[in-house]
Image (spheres, grey):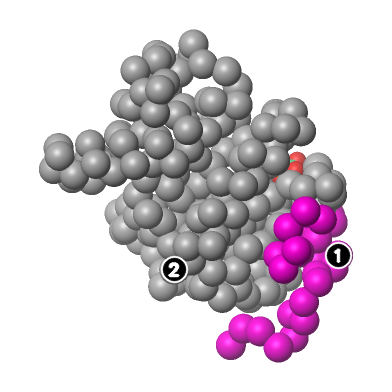
Amino acid sequence: MINVRYLSHSFGRYWALKNITFSLEKGDFLFLTGPSGAGKTTLMRLLHGSLPLQRGAAAIAGFDLKNLAPRKRYLLRRQVAIVFQDFKILPDRSVWDNVALPLIVRGMVKNQVQKRVRAVLRGLSLDRKSWCLCREISGGEQQRVAVARAVVVNPKVLLADEPTGNLDKKLSVQLMEVFRQFHVHGTTVVFATHNEELIRSQSGAKVLALKDGSIAGANWSLEETGV
Ligand SMILES: Nc1ncnc2c1ncn2[C@@H]1O[C@H](COP(=O)(O)OP(=O)(O)O)[C@@H](O)[C@H]1O
Ligand SMILES: [Mg+2]
C-alpha cells in the first residue's frame, strides 16, 4: 500500500529527510514518531503528494509519486486523505458543510452525499452538532470534524499528522479509538505522534522513529519488506 525507497528531501541546503526506506501492507497501522523537526510532516506531505518528490521513490495506494502529474493529484487525494494538526477546517461553515465538501467537489449526487455525511457524523458522535458552525464547537469536536472530512471519502490510506497534539488525554484516547476503528475496517493508517503513551496503547502497530531526517529505529524488519 505504501512503498518508500531511499527517499530524501531537502529544503534549500537542509536535508529534512535522508534515505528513508520502508513499506506498509494494506491495513497496517504505523506510528511515525520522533522529536519535533525529525521530518514527520515532510514525509506526510510527500506521501500526500503536496510536496514534489526530489530523490528516491515512493508509491502509495497504487500511485507512483515520482511520475504523478500535478493535474492527476486529485485522483491520489481520493485514495489518500490527511488530517492536519491544526485541523484546517472552515470555521464559518457548519459541521455538515465541512464534511460534505469533499464529496460535493467530487460531484457526488445529493442524496448519496447526505447518506455518507450522516453516517460519518454519527460514527464520530457529531450528529447532534451537524448544524453548528465549526468555530462554535469545542477543540475536540473540531478535531473530529477534521477526521470526519478525511474519512468521508473512504480513503485507502489515512495520514494523520499529530492529530492529538492539541487535545487533552481523554480526547486523545477517544480520537485514537476512531482511528483504530478505521484500521480495523482495512484502512491503512499512518499516525504521526510523539506521545509514547498513545503508541504503547496500540499493541500490534508498527512504529517507525525518525531523528534528524533519518530512520532511528523500527519495531519490524525493514530489510524484508519492499521490492
Ligand atoms: N517549508 C520548509 N522550509 C524550510 N525548512 C523546512 C520546511 N518544512 C520543514 N522544514 C525543516 O525540515 C525539518 C523537518 O521538519 P518537519 O518535517 O516539519 O518535522 P516534524 O514534523 O517531525 O516536526 C525541520 O528542521 C524543519 O525546520
Ligand atoms: Mg510536524
Question: The residue under label 1 is which amino acid type?
Answer: Ala
Q: Is residue 128 above or below residue 121?
A: above
Q: Residue at x 70, y 40 (%)?
A: 173
Foreground residue, 95 or 210?
95
Foreground residue, 131 or 220?
131
Report whether the residue tagged 2 is closer than 8 Å to ligand 1: no
Counting from the top left corner in percent of width and height, residue 133 is at 41, 14
Q: Residue at x 57, y 38 (%)?
A: 84
Is 222 one of the magenta-colored residues? yes
Q: From which residue to which does the magenta span run?
A: 199-227
Q: Which residue position holds label 2?
A: 61
When asked about the image quadrant of residue 47, the answer is bottom right
Q: Which residue position holds label 1?
A: 216
Counting from the top left corner in percent of width and height, residue 111 is at 15, 39
Q: Residues within 10 Å of mark 1 (few under 14, many from 20)?
A: few
Q: Residue at x 44, y 68 (%)?
A: 61
What is the tally of numbered marks visible in this picture? 2
Would residue 121 be found to the left or right of residue 178 on screen?
Answer: left
Between disc 2 and disc 1, whose residue precedes? Answer: 2
Q: In what quadrant of the picture does the C terminus appear?
A: bottom right
Is 27 one of the magenta-colored residues? no
Counting from the top left corner in percent of width and height, residue 197 is at 83, 47
Alpha carbon distance from label 2 to label 1: 25 Å
